[in-house]
Image (spheres, rainbow, N blue to C red):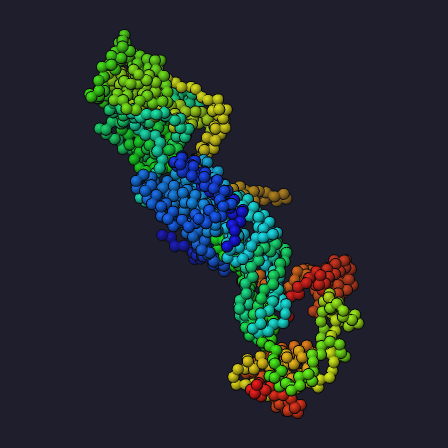
Amino acid sequence: MAILPTTGLSSLLWVLRLPWEGLRWLFATRPIRFTRLGLFYTLFVIGVGAAAINTGNNLLYLILGILLGLIVVSGFLSDSGLWGIRTQWQPLETLYAHKTTPFLCVVEKGWFPAVGLHVRAFGSGSKPVELGLAWVGSRTTTQQALSVTPLRRGWLPLGEERFSTVFPFGLFEKFHVHHPNDRWLVYPAVRRLPLAELGFASPRPAQEPARRAGEGASPFLVRDYRLGDRPSRIHWKLSAKRSAWMVNEMEEETDPGSSLWISSWPANDVEAFISWVASFIYTLISDGKSVGFYAPGLHLQQDSTRAQLDRILRYLALVDPATEKPTVSALEHGRMQHSIDLLQRWRSR
Amino acid sequence: MNPILSPYLWAIRAMSVIGLAALCLTGELEPAYCLAGICTFMLSFILDRLPKLQRRFRRLETPVVVVLILQLVLDMTMRHQTIFIAVAHFLILFQVFKWCGLKERKDAFQIFLFGFFQLLAACTLSVDVWQAALLLAVIPVGAAGLYWNSVQREADLSGIKAEGRTRTLYLRMGLGISTGAIPTVVALTAFVFLVFPRLTLNASLPGFGNAHIGYTDRINLSQSGTLKGDETIVLWLSFPDDRIRMAWDGYLRGSTLSQFDGRLWSPAKQTSLRTLTPDGSGWFRFAPTRGREEFTQEIMLIDPSASTVFMAGRPLAIHAPLPSLQRDEAGSVHWSVSWKRPLRYQITATYSAAALASDSKEDPSALTNVGLASLALGRLASLARTITAGATTDDARAHQIERYLRTKYAYSLDLPSGSSENPVEDFLFQSRRGPCGYFASAMAVLLRLEGIPARVVAGYYRGEWNEPAKQFTIREKDAHAWVEAYLLGQGWVRFDPSPRSTTSSASARRWHSVRQYMDYMGLKWNNWVIQYDLYAQLRAFERVRRSSESLNDQVAVWMSRPRKGSSSITEPTVTSSKQSLPYKTLLFFAVLLASAGAYARPRTPSSLPNSARDYLSFLNRMARRGHTRRPEETGLEFAQRMEREDPSKKEVVWEATRRYYQLRFSRSHDPYSPGGPS
């Protein structure tokens, strides 16, 4: 027997590896999963093939061809239904830990319609959410709202985005997986605390300052225009940017405000402490109180605006108590301002 | 649970019709089951409007299934039906029940599957050309059924419903898939059909027998009733030589029946069989072919269940894809192996007297005895003497009997009697009319009573010339029986005492040409599809290989032809083109893989909106032309610089920039900015 030349042998091996490589490439780029119907269908096809081979009945060969042909058509159509999909996710409200928040998912499709499309996202940082879309036309967008419940404060990544469909015949579930880099900030869980817990409870509640949002001299926040708002309060620049009327809301400046500081992090229940601090500040600012905040890595002068609340909540969302240690200057500054030690207040509540 | 979608209902109705039509067209289904199937279809319309009745039927599901399984077992054991027919009965009855209790997607899909299984069962029972139409119809119907089942499943399980405008879109998509599946699946089916290896293993399973019952090598005179003119095509016969075709006497020999017990003609029991094997070229040689008046005929035997080789004249050689043939002393040729598909064979035969004399090794003297000792044959012998009075030779006597029967008796498909002790005597003296079997029996008996050795031959007569196919079509109704008498000096001579029946109905004449074309399609179906076996596959591959080589040579010649302005002339050689073939093939596959890889390369998911992508694409194109946007430049600044540097591109640059700014920063056009609030 003649010995094959080396180049010929390597060529032969290359050719022999082709089907395996082809299959590997196919399943890597187009992963599929059998549905129960698809499994039975495949077994049935194998049975018909075996019967055709055994009997030599050419009609069985034709039926085998039809069944295999339908598999190919199914593969082509389902793949076409998944190619060219892009999504954009947007929260419709501020995200807080453990609070179910509505999200808007905008799905854009390429050259072929997506039929019966399932989108799954938020694998980490939240309970996975699944979206079912009956139809996304070719070169069009469809949007659908859904609810997301972040499990913890910090960054909420979109994580793995999985598009799947059983279109057109329900024989196989084909899916594509994307790894987008989108992420959103999740504030710590907040709740409105009772005044007694805040330490501002008074025997004469009527003397407590009321909620002061409304007419006043200092800017409070910017909000959507409501019928009856004075046109002079319209925030023109923001209105132009958003293509919607926005108005300035003002407040009165009568409250001396409170300075809050975190002397140190508790040894246990850090997350509960952070959530309580966020709730404390949230309640104060919601009631129109001016709040200054001194914490490891952050010094904020007194302010009662929404921006102040966002700054504090952002800090609390991202803070890592293991690395952010209280500094001496912060502690001194806190003492000088006669501010409220939040850790003590938390322990004594 | 959502109600079943109406397109889905239509799809399963269509599949039910296909399955039922397939089973009915096989002719193997009893009329009661056909009726049950038709009722199924009617029920599907009525019971849609009777949900209460459907609920009641659903409660009976378990006992009904048990009863139907019992019926299946009884069909196979007591009624000795083949498994396919028993399963067909089961499917039809179960389908009727399912239609009655149809409520959920699961029921609908089961009915859909039953329809398909019925078609599958029909494919094992018959291979006629109408199967092609049904198989073609099952593609869009199957695709639509699977599609709507999937839509229904999504609605039931995932809550993705086809409602409102989406329903219209789903309908359009369903129609598109159904129609688009036809060419795609047909092409893929053709590919699978052509290249799938034909390895007929013939592993037998109990109960999976051949259900075909056609030609039999018996003539039974004790049957009663009326024979029906069965239009089923038995075989196709062609003569390559037109002169032979014109000269053909119309007789196709099948089995020779020498033994008669008063009611039944059958082949001789004590006959020795000669087994023949093919030579190297696949021919079974019966006698030397040189020096004889021989002719060639080609036969496509559609129904090979009789295991008999039909032929015109006496065979000299047969070319057939069989491992062995057996020839009895009377000259009939059979095979003993299992052959369930249509059989194509070629015969070299002759009508020469020498061949006729030497063809049969049967002892003629044994065939003079009527062998009916228990019957009174006085009247028959007296009639024979009366008919042959005056004739001096056996030849003359035989011809007188033949003429007498032809002229004094009438041909009829009505069988004369069913319980007579002596059907031949009843035929000759009482009914005086009957089918060809009675004429042949009567003549053979009269000849034997006259001392002339005679036997009955069963076969086919003439058939019908099919102009499109240029072949003779032989149908079941063309089955015929005639007599062979042994005459001294001539050997076995054929006599046909049956009067000719030439009547044909007006409607048959009207549809004659249509039927011819349908028969022609059936022939092509048999030639191209049913006959496609391992040998045909190898031949087809060989043909493709030769064609590709020829094409390759032509391309090589074309590539190496002298160009204009070229002084050197190179002679193209086949060797060089053959040597380059592997490289070209490899190159072809490399290009194919590269293009497939380029298509399937996983692309980085982009979060950019369309406007930004288009503008980036524009910037890339500009960069390739030497105009790169600087990192610190905004789009407007880049456009202004371009206007200064290359005024010819001013309009293009400004247009692209304007569109980008409009799309990118106008909320009404591009409302969804990239990324999230991070």
Number of marks drawn: 0
User: Does B624 appear above or below B96?
Assistant: below
Residue B632 percent coordinates (x, y)? 71, 70
Residue sitting at 71 percent across and 68 percent down?
B630
Would residue B645 be visible to someone looking at this image? no
Would residue B337 be visible to someone looking at this image? yes
Residue A116 percent coordinates (x, y)? 55, 55
Residue sitting at 60 percent across and 49 percent down?
B168
Q: Which image quarter is the C terminus of chain A in?
A: bottom right
A65 and B587: which is toward the camera: A65
Residue sitting at 76 percent across and 70 percent down?
A229
Furthest-top residue in this view: B390
Residue B259 percent coordinates (x, y)? 25, 25
Residue B452 percent coordinates (x, y)? 25, 16
Residue sitting at 62 percent across and 64 percent down?
A104
User: Does B278 appear above or below A277?
Assistant: above
User: Does B309 appear above or below B57?
Assistant: above
